[in-house]
C-alpha cells in the first residue's frame, strides 16, 4: 500500500525558518553560490541553532507522542539548498531528535511547487517570494519574521490568526480601504448573515480543528485564537461565518484597532498570522509572526519598480 497523508496535518517548512542559517546565508550574499556550498560542506557537522519557527515545529511534532494524536502531524522540509549542502540541515534535525524524514531540496529554485505534491496545509518560509508564489497558487503560506527570544509558556500549541485576508477573503477589507470605516461597518451589518468567502488559511484552520476534535478539552494540545481589528457590530458576520464552517475557535479578540502585540503575548501565541506587514512587525516583538502577503494590503509591484 502506498504511503498516504490522509487525515494528517501536513506542514511544509523551509530550512531557514526551522534553523538559524544566518552565517551561511551571509556567505551566500557576500561571496556567492560556490562559497556558500563550500561553507556548508565544511560545516556540515556543526549543529545549527534553532530558527524562528523551531519551537512551533517542536510543539507540532509532540502531538504525535500523545495517544489521541499519534501519527496525525507530518512536517516536511522544503529547501532551496541542494541535497549536498542540505546535509547540515538533516544532521541538525537528527541532533535535536526531530522526527522529520521527508524533504525536497530544490537546488536553488523555489521549492513552493512541492507544496501541493506533499498535500501541505501550510508552507512557512523566510523567503517572501516563495511564499507569494505558494499563495498565488492557492495554498496557505506565510513569511516567518525574526523575533526576540520567547520561551514557550507551556506545551500547548497556541496559534493566532487575523481574520480578513487570512482566514477569510479580503472582500470586506476592500470596502474599508476604498470607502472608509463607516461604509465597512454598514456593509458588515447588512451582510451579517452572509458568510464571508474563504481566505487562504481556512484549510489549515480546519486541519487543526480536526485534530482538536480527537481530544477532550482538558487534554487538547492545540489552542486557536482569532485576533482581529474588527469590533461590534462587525463581529457578528465573523461569528456566523465560523459557525457555517463548523469550526471552533477557542478565543476571539475583537480589538477595534488596538495594537495586537500585548494581546498576543497574553494569549501566549507560538505564531500569529496576519496579512499586514506592519502588524506582523509589531507582533514579532512579542511572538513569532507569519506575514501572509495576500489581498488588497499586499499589491503586486509592477516589474521594474
Image (cartoon, rainbow, N blue to C red):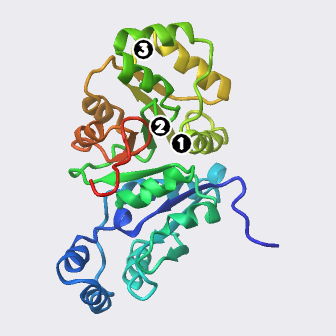
**N-terminal-most mark, 2 or 3:** 2
Q: Nearer the viewer, residue 32 or 51?
A: 32
Q: Residue at x 51, y 51 (%)?
A: 136
Percent position (x, y) of residue 245? 66, 29
Report helix, strand or loop for mark 2.
Answer: loop
Is 198 on the left-hand or right-hand side of 283?
right
**N-terminal-most mark, 1 or 2:** 2
Is 32 on the left-hand or right-hand side of 56?
left
Rounded to the nearest angstrom, the CA distance separating label 1 from label 2 is: 6 Å
Q: Residue at x 42, y 37 (%)?
A: 160
Percent position (x, y) of residue 127? 36, 61
Are the residues at dot 1 and dot 2 in contact (C-beta closer than 8 Å)? Answer: yes
Is 56 on the left-hand or right-hand side of 281?
right
Q: Quadrant for residue 159, please give it.
A: top left
Rounded to the nearest angstrom, the CA distance separating label 1 from label 3 is: 21 Å
Q: Residue at x 51, y 8 (%)?
A: 189
Q: Disc 2 marks which residue?
A: 166
Does residue 290 sit above or below 102 in this rendering?
above
Q: Quadrant for residue 299, please give it.
A: top left
Q: Disc 1 marks which residue?
A: 200
Is 262 on the left-hand or right-hand side of 78?
left
Camera-nearest label, 2 or 3: 3
Kindly identify which numbered label has been placed on residue 184.
3
Amino acid at each position: 500500500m502506498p504511503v498516504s497523508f490522509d487525515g494528517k496535518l501536513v506542514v511544509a517548512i523551509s530550512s531557514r525558518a526551522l534553523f538559524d542559517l544566518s552565517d551561511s546565508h551571509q556567505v551566500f550574499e557576500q561571496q556567492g553560490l560556490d562559497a556558500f556550498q563550500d561553507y556548508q560542506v565544511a560545516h556540515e557537522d556543526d549543529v545549527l541553532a534553532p530558527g524562528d519557527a523551531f519551537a512551533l515545529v517542536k510543539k507540532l511534532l509532540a502531538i504525535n507522542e500523545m495517544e489521541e494524536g499519534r501519527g496525525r502531524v507530518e512536517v516536511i522540509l522544503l529547501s532551496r539548498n541542494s541535497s549536498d549542502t542540505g546535509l547540515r540541515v538533516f544532521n541538525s534535525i537528527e541532533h535535536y531528535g526531530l522526527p522529520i524524514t521527508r524533504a525536497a531540496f530544490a537546488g536553488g529554485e523555489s521549492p513552493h511547487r512541492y507544496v501541493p505534491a506533499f498535500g501541505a496545509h501550510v508552507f512557512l518560509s523566510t523567503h517572501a517570494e516563495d511564499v507569494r508564489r505558494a499563495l498565488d497558487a492557492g495554498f496557505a503560506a506565510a513569511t516567518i519574521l525574526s523575533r526576540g527570544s520567547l520561551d514557550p509558556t507551556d506545551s500547548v500549541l497556541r496559534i493566532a490568526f487575523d481574520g480578513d485576508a487570512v482566514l477569510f477573503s479580503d472582500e470586506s477589507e476592500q470596502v474599508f480601504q476604498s470607502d472608509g470605516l463607516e461604509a465597512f461597518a454598514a456593509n458588515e451589518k447588512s451582510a451579517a448573515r452572509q458568510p464571508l468567502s474563504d481566505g487562504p488559511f481556512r484549510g489549515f484552520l480546519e486541519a487543526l480543528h480536526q485534530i482538536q476534535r480527537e481530544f477532550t478539552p482538558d487534554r487538547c494540545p492545540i489552542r486557536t485564537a482569532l485576533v482581529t481589528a474588527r469590533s461590534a457590530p462587525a463581529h457578528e458576520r465573523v461569528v456566523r461565518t465560523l459557525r457555517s464552517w463548523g469550526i471552533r475557535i477557542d478565543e476571539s479578540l475583537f480589538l477595534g484597532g488596538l495594537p495586537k502585540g500585548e494581546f498576543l503575548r497574553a494569549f501566549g501565541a507560538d505564531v500569529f498570522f496576519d496579512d499586514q506587514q506592519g502588524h506582523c512587525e509589531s507582533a514579532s516583538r512579542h511572538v513569532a509572526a507569519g506575514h501572509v502577503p495576500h489581498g488588497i494590503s499586499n499589491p503586486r509591484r509592477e516589474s521594474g519598480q
